[in-house]
Amino acid sequence: MRKFDTKVQHAKYKVLREVARLAWEDKLLDKVLDIPAMLAPGKEATTRCCVYKERAILGERVKVAMGGDKENPNVIQVIDIACDECPVGGYEVTNACRGCLAHRCEDVCRFGALSFDSNHVAHIDKSKCKECGACAKVCPYTAIVGRKRPCQNACKVKAISMNDEKAAIIDNSKCIQCGACVYQCPFGAISDKSYIVDAIEILKRSERNTITGKYKVYAVIAPSISSQFSYAKLGQVITGLKKLGFHDVVEAALGADMVAMAEAKELAEKGLLTSSCCPAFVQYIKSAFPNLLPYVSHNQSPMTVLAKYIKDTTPNAKVIFIGPCTAKKAELQLDEVKPYVDTVLTFEELQALIDSRDIDLASLEEGVLDNASYYGRIFARSGGLTDAAAQALKEQNIDFEVKPVVCDGIEACRTALLKLSKGVLDGNFIEGMACIGGCIGGAGCLTHGEKNKAEVDKYGREAYEKTISGAISVLK
């Protein structure tokens, strides 16, 4: 059974797996330069013009798998040498141009970018074109079309442009590190930095005495894991995590239950609120709507809330969060998060980690995961947080009616935030998720699609008898 949606994901995985394998064996520094030749051993290239370029790109992928460019704080990184196969894009005249006499396209162009040949066929001077799109709008034959690279189409915050060498560059002041460009790039030229080596070092050190004594490593897993690893049962994944060296596996959904109770109370007190669970959504507000920051919930994310509880109650504990989200790696860098979360892995990286130890998940016995309520588990999909907030109000006997505006995808979030900024929002709670579908659409997922929502709901129903307050009662 296929483990990934795309071959790009599989290529990224193979590098992560080999880096992880060498890291487990303490051979990474000695053997790291051998990985490109090992993964592209032949004399003929399979994906690029020549095997030398293919290996050069693999070498850059290895660097990203080992943490990437330390000088760049963004967890999303462009591999320049791999970014060379997409057309530059912009506005182009197609063969639908009939050479009409009206020349409306020329009339509306304020930059003198349109000219005509002897047959009156239009041509666009790319050096003058500002890509405003005015010419395309007035062409009676729709003969002028705007083309963008996949990464630019994927980036809804307009953080991606092209440099002089036609490679993608990312404006860190706009980027929300959601990873949409990572998933959509057909050549894998944009990737998220991996902390898989850091995770391995944490797990290895837990097995031997340290200056502060032995410590326990906890895996906090996002509820969207229920829609991943389609070739094995969730209980087998839990057992696999423990075989990797994790002391215990805890649902981040339990943190979601904790957040739901606190966020519901804050909503009732303030009367108007936006969610704070999605770090990419919060970063978008910071960069594009800073005047709306007072409306953002003061609650930390489920990941951070649960990690803090673990460290407050367990001496020498280490916490590794595992989920679908590249923006969680950015959240890890925040001062208010650093003390509680030691590193972050995506589901893609977890698959590489499991396979680097030759663990056959499908052959394992099933472990048990029974921490959270139905409402905490459905945080993984769009609308889940809203349902949880309404339930939390009910369980706390708070008389407040939630009028939610549920947004999945930055374009929907932008519309809601614009309405809020203008005072015309028809609602009192914005649930903002940067990814389409919610966390189940995260760039670090193994698989994406509508079936993932059904799997999350199914997983949630397994805990349907448990209330939110019942789930968090064990923490008191």
Image: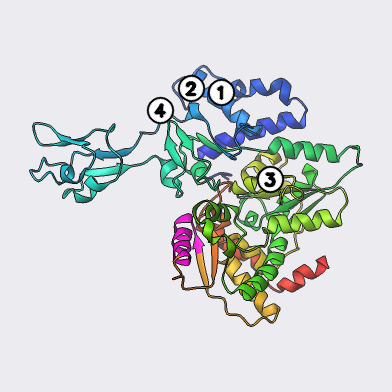
Residue 248 can be seen, yes or no? yes
Front residue of 82/176: it is 176
Q: Which residue is mark 3?
A: 344
User: Percent x, y for residue 83?
Assistant: 46, 31
Q: Is label 3 in a helix, a strand or a loop?
A: strand
- The numbered mark, 3 or 1, whose residue comes first in the sequence reads 1
Q: Which residue is mark 1?
A: 40
Q: Nearer the viewer, mark 3 or mark 2?
A: 3
Contact check, label 2 and label 1, Cβ < 8 Å:
yes
- The numbered mark, 2 or 4, whose residue comes first in the sequence reads 2
Q: Which residue is mark 4?
A: 164
Q: Is label 2 in a helix, a strand or a loop?
A: loop
Q: Magenta region, mostly helix, strand or loop? A: helix
Question: Which amino acid, mark 2?
Answer: Ala
Q: Which residues are the magenta region? A: 407-421
Q: Nearer the viewer, mark 3 or mark 4?
A: 4
- The numbered mark, 3 or 4, whose residue comes first in the sequence reads 4
Packing grade of label 3 (10 A; few <14, some 14-19, many >=20) is many
Q: Which residue is mark 2?
A: 45
- Looking at the image, which residue is at 40% across and 30% down? 166
